[in-house]
Image (cartoon, rainbow, N blue to C red):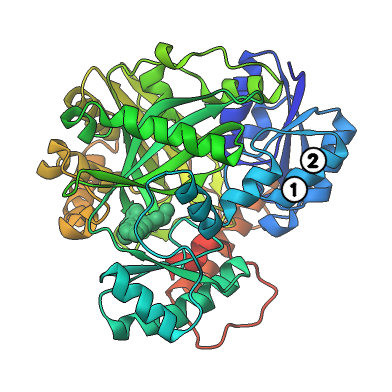
Amino acid sequence: MLKKILVANRGEIALRAIRAAKEMGIKTVAVYSEADANAKFVYYSDEAHLIGPGPAAQSYLKMEKIIEVAKKTGAEGIHPGYGFLAQNAKFVRMCDEAGVEFIGPKATAQELLGDKLGARRSMKKAGIPIVPGALDAVQDDKDALQVAEETGYPVMVKPAGGGGGIGMQVCRSKDELLEAIKKAQRLAASAFSRPEVYIEKYVEKPRHIEIQILADKKGNVIYLGERECSIQRRHQKLIEEAPSPVMYVDPDLRRRMGETAVKVAKVAGYENAGTCEFLYSDKDRAFYFLEVNSRLQVEHPVTELVTGIDIVKEQYKIASGETLSLKQEEIRITGHAMECRINAEDPLNNFVPSIGVITNYIEPGGPGVRVDSGIYAGYTIPPFYDSLAVKLLAWGNNRDECIGRMRRALGEFVIEGIQTVIPFHKVMMNDEEFVKGNIHTEFIQDRNILEKVKAQYEEDEVWRKSKANVLSKIQPKTDEGSPSGGQMTDKKTVALAAAIASYIQSKPPKQPVSSNWVISDRMKNAR
Ligand code: MV4
């Protein structure tokens, strides 16, 4: 078994990786940026090393630096978390060369699965059901029109180089198609440095269902059931659950999807934990392979709650060369689990990131509640990173009990000083169609959920004010020349937050402004 690992990430997922290691007696090394000096994961790690300034390009993406810390500290493995270096084949190769175990799939599997069009070809050849459409990149307008005609409108244009929804466009006619292709090629070239795009049949209002898999180094692969992740906004998942509500209607679907995912993993020579994404059409009762996420995912705890399996511990065991100790027949799904992503974003203002000092923080608890949080009272949310602050999970014997607990837990949660998406989740947990499980990927728009969030927010404010005398708060210091270094950092971050907020709210310029500022992706997305 690995004796010491380095966690090459931050926030709640760094903490998650540290917690599993601690329970197994594995020593942990954290690496952190200047902006994360006061973070929980730094505090909970056995040792922590500063690797650079706040912007990720100068810290969490510094491959040589991170490997250097691993070598220096005697860490035998690197857990990449999600994002940053988790799906970077070059980094995996560098780990291999340095003799450090990358806790995740090999570089070859990362490359095969990172090429979405290549993966589509390999999976089609292996008999995996894929969405109808092209197996090659668009050559020219004539070629595009022909493929779309054969496939039948509406179609979706997708970049070959990357998934996750970036640069994808729906086209309902010839005219839309030619426009979309040009735009998608431009986006793909800048986001993935590969301009190729391809055409698929657009599946209308599908469910997004994914299968969690575990694969050891000896070719054994099992599936841990599914998660439904249909509740998304602009390709950002907000709610995930297991089982998918469709599994209550078609109990054999899990086995069919699960066995398909296992086959996908075997075709790709996959190892460690991973997720196979599918689209499911209620109308056709059919599922289609989309892509593999070759990393531990944000929503993995949903599966942990219904299977009782600690996925991160399994990752460490697999990376250490152990044979999977779990057999497919031993995997049981018990009850229902749900995750609400509590982003530090303002749901009343286009989900613009909200940063600053947490002046009050009280976590929910009680039966069936799990909180994976990177924040605490007095902590300052830095502006450089993803806005996911807390993952709130509920488990129940059935979906109704699970939703009841989630509603109760959301009601207990106190987070002050910043805006969060808690009011959005409260609206969702009371939506009639959501409660029935009638969800799909266009649910938030179709049900006008965002229009109901303001009323919820105001209701919360009335409650908060009526109880203001009960809970104490941290008073952020604003006076000049404070002797406390920590407060100085807070002041700087708050000033930065104000600058970024005004930047976001300004109209996007035609020409990109040249500046030495590094604006994080979430800031760009908010514009
Ligand atoms: C699709 C699709 C419908 N038809 N492909 C988006 C993320 C990426 N992993 C795959 N995605 C989709 N691919 C075809 N052929 C629907 C999605 C999709 C989606 C589309 C619009 C709005 C929200 C969505 C949420 C999840 C998936």
User: What's the mark number on residue 449?
Assistant: none
Q: Is the N terminus in the top left, top right, bottom left or bottom right quadrant?
A: top right
Percent of width and height locating residue 179 = 39, 84
**Along the line of sight, which residue is nearer the eye, 355 or 47?**
47
Picture layout, residue 291 above or below residue 246: below
**Along the line of sight, which residue is nearer the eye, 302 or 320?**
320
The reply, left or right, for residue 526 in relation to residue 113 is left
Q: Residue furthest left?
A: 432
Percent of width and height locating residue 378 = 53, 39
Residue 375: tell me if it is visible. no
Q: Is the C terminus in the top left, top right, bottom left or bottom right quadrant?
A: bottom left
User: What's the mark number on residue 91?
Assistant: 1
Q: Which quadrant of the render holds ligand 1? A: bottom left
Residue 519: tell me if it is visible. yes
Percent of width and height locating residue 422 = 31, 44
Q: Quadrant of residue 202?
A: bottom left
Q: Amino acid at mark 2?
A: Cys
Q: Amino acid at mark 1?
A: Phe
Q: Residue furthest right?
A: 72
Circle 1 Cα neighbour tier, 10 Å, few/some/many (<14 / 14–19 / ≥20): many
Q: Quadrant of residue 190?
A: bottom right
- Give the residue number, with chain letter if any, for mark 2: 95
Circles 1 and 2: CB atoms closer than 8 Å: yes
Picture layout, residue 236 above or below residue 67: below
Picture layout, residue 67 above or below residue 331: below
**SS for dot 1:** helix
Q: CA distance from mark 1 to mark 2?
A: 6 Å
Q: Residue at x 65, y 41 (%)?
A: 9
Percent of width and height locating residue 493 = 60, 57
Circle 2 Cα neighbour tier, 10 Å, few/some/many (<14 / 14–19 / ≥20): many
| Ligand 1 is within 8 Å of the C-beta of the residue at disc 1 | no
